[in-house]
Amino acid sequence: MSETAYLNGEFLPIEQAKISVLDRGFIFGDGVYEVIPVYSRRPFRLAEHLARLQASLDAIRLVNPHPAPKWTELVGKIVAGNPWEDQAVYLQITRGAAKRDHVFPKGVKPTVFMMASELVPPSAELVKSGAKAIVLPDRRWLRCDIKSVSLLGNCMLRTLAADQDCAEAILVREGMLTEASASNVFIVKDGTVLTPPKSHLILPGITYDVVLEILRENSIAHEVRPVTEAELRSAEEVWVTSSSREVLAITTLDGKRVGSGQPGPVGERVHALYHQYKAKVMRAPIHA
Ligand SMILES: Cc1ncc(COP(=O)(O)O)c(C=O)c1O
């Protein structure tokens, strides 16, 4: 089976999908996106991803081109048109093609694009060993809550991490932890799980919400509150969370061991509970 994409009303092989060079997504990065994990061909937390998409669109004054049932149908068709059981469905909406001018143009048709790739969770070895990360100043803009396609800041930070053979760059702004270049961050300090609250400085992660639900439901001590760089650097455990990384322990930070240098007990428990939750949701009857 070849890879199927979707562009402005049409399903087609990805190599045939073409857009105008005047598209504002190309010229200005004027667009938003979502990445929806799909397990055994069933989208995970689709309603939440579509709600975050709506929030991103509202923030940049772009009208949602489709109601939720239509998105559900389109996501279903992309999933059916691609070969993998587990997929990451990428969808992007840009403001469309218009004469280059910074001001948002009126009456322009948005560009709607979707594609899928195989969703490969972190390997068993990586989960067992944990990953390496570096700490960097968060030099991105101040609307990190918008899932904008303008990801140059994130790409620069992630590349600095990759240069040092690290999986992530964990970011601090004015002495406070924000998130990582492509994930949210949780730490364990004196036995309590800590994570920064949602604000314009972080992306409201869907996995972040799932992890907080798991902590609540299992009475695992936690606090959502600002976290200092000093707390991050002296934490017993550090984890990053995202749809593709799930709950992944960071065991080396700036070349130093985090805690014992092995994934810690709280993170291991939450990782196991996350997998239980995923399995339960995937077994539940499908409803609209
Ligand atoms: C900057 C950033 N923060 C957090 C996340 C985690 O979001 P989610 O859990 O919805 O994948 C992502 C995901 O790509 C991200 O790019």
Image (cartoon, helix red, strand yellow):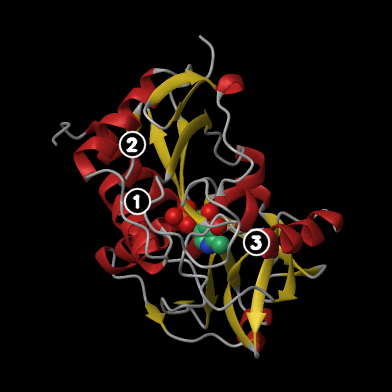
Which residue is painted at 37% across and 58% down in the image? 62
Residue assigned mark 2: 43
Determine the CA span between mark 3 and mark 2: 27 Å
Determine contact: label 1, label 3, CB under 8 Å: no
Marks counted in the figure total 3
- Element marked by disc 1: helix
| Distance from the alpha carbon under mark 2 to that under mark 1 | 10 Å
What residue lies at 40% left-to-right and 62% top-to-bottom?
Answer: 56
Depth order, front residue of 166/273: 166
First reached walking from the N terminus: tag 3 or tag 2: 2
| Image spot of residue 107 (x, y percent) | 36, 53
Foreground of the two, 213 or 151: 151
Q: Which mark is residue 250?
A: 3
Circle 3 SS class: strand
136 sits to left or right of 212: right
Q: Are marks 2 and 1 in contact (CB under 8 Å)?
A: yes
Callout 1 environment at 10 Å: few (<14), some (14 to 19), or many (20+)?
A: some
Rendering quarter of residue 212: bottom left
What is the residue that sits farthest to the right in this orientation? 163
Q: Residue placed at 31% from the left, 27% from the top? A: 76
Q: Amino acid at mark 3?
A: Ile
Label 1, label 3: how far apart the Cα atoms are: 26 Å
Q: Amino acid at mark 2?
A: Pro
Mark 3 sits near ligand 1, with its Cβ under 8 Å away: no
Q: In the drawing, what numbered circle is on residue 49?
A: 1
Indicate the secondary structure of the residue bearing disc 2: strand
Residue 203 visible here: yes
Disc 1 C-beta below 8 A from ligand 1: yes
Task: Judge depth for marks 1 and 3 and give the one in front.
Answer: 1
Q: Position of residue 68 (x, y in %)?
A: 22, 44
Q: Amino acid at mark 1?
A: His
